[in-house]
Amino acid sequence: MDTFQRIKKIVLEKIDVQEDRLTPDATLEGLGLDSLDRVELMFSLEEEFKIKIPDREVTIVTIHDVVNVIDKLAEEQHGEV
């Protein structure tokens, strides 16, 4: 399962959104994620991908942004994608 599919599965478990709306270009705001939802999502992603998302400001607007950040962190922290 690629990064997008894994993220999609987590998002579908965490929020009430139709699966067809969950595209790479979908914005987190457009999917209805508030700030608490985003924090919970980040914790779930850390657990799923066995990574640590740094406290530094990371710009995440779309699901595609989430994929890019996760892939980059996995590469940096584990040497893999």
Image (cartoon, rainbow, N blue to C red):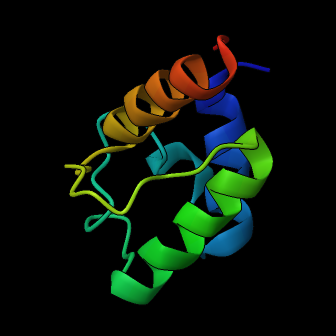
Q: Is residue 19 above or below residue 63?
A: below
Query: Does residue 24 show up?
Result: no
**15 to 1, vertically: above or below:** below
Q: Position of residue 35 (x, y in %)?
A: 34, 83
**Location of residue 32 (image quadrant):** bottom left
Instruction: Work out whether 12 lies above or below 3.
Output: below
- At a point 65% along the width and 43% down the height, the residue shown is 51
**Count of marks, rendered view:** 0
Asked where in the image residue 16 lies, by quadrant, the reply is bottom right
| Residue in the image at 22% along x and 51% along y | 61
- Asked whether 25 or 49 is in front, the reply is 49
Q: Is residue 57 above or below residue 33?
A: above
Q: Residue at x 27, y 64 (%)?
A: 30
Q: Residue at x 53, y 44 (%)?
A: 20
Q: Quadrant of the N terminus?
A: top right
Left or right, 13 with respect to 17, comes to right
60 sits left or right of 41 in the view: left
| Residue 43 place in picture, x, y as percent | 62, 67
Side of 17 relative to 31 (left or right): right
In this rendering, does residue 35 appear at all? yes
Q: Position of residue 70 (x, y in %)?
A: 51, 34
Looking at the rendered image, the quarter that the C terminus falls into is top right
Position in image of residue 73 (x %, y %): 50, 31
> For this view, does 44 lie left or right of residue 59?
right
